[in-house]
Image (cartoon, rainbow, N blue to C red):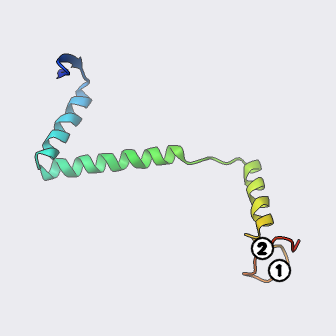
Amino acid sequence: MSEIVDGDPRKMSRLEAIIKAQADLAVKGDPRATNAVINRVEKLEAAEADRQMPSFTSADREVIAEIHRRLGLIEKPGTSEGAPTQPGQE
């Protein structure tokens, strides 16, 4: 399949042609096509967000826990529940 882009023919896959046709229908106001395009975009965005999530090693988690401990964001063992350790109270 091909389409004309800037006066030149450009080849496109059948999948690209189907998606383009569906997007064209959505732009023209077809509610089913609009819903399908929106759902597809949401799935693509969710997949992209999952790929961008950092994966921490156990060493990374230990460093993060130590930083939290030093900043007083977690409790020191033996302190009262709910009372975070303040910096300098080690």
- Percent x, y for residue 48? 45, 44
- Determine the residue positioned at 11% across, 49% down: 30
* Mark 2, secondary structure of its residue: loop
Work out whether residue 26 can be spotted.
yes
* Residue sticking out furthest to the bottom: 80
Report the front residue among 61 and 90.
Answer: 90
Q: Count up the numbered dots.
A: 2
Q: Are marks 1 and 2 in contact (CB under 8 Å)?
A: yes
- Percent x, y for residue 88? 86, 71
* Disc number placed over residue 11 in the picture, else none: none
CA gap, disc 1 and disc 2: 7 Å
Q: Is residue 30 above or below residue 19?
A: below
Q: In the rendered image, which residue does mark 1 sit on?
A: 79
- Percent x, y for residue 42? 34, 50
- Determine the residue positioned at 73% across, 56% down: 64
* Quadrant in which the N terminus appears: top left
Q: Quadrant of residue 67?
A: bottom right
- Percent x, y for residue 56? 67, 48
Work out whether residue 1 can be spotted.
no
What's under tag 1, amino acid-wise? Thr
Locate residue 72 relative to residue 35 in the image: left or right: right
Q: Is residue 18 above or below residue 67?
A: above
What's under tag 2, amino acid-wise? Glu
Q: Residues within 10 Å of mark 2 (few under 14, many from 20)?
A: some
Q: In the rendered image, which residue does mark 2 sit on?
A: 75
- Determine the residue positioned at 76% across, 66% down: 71
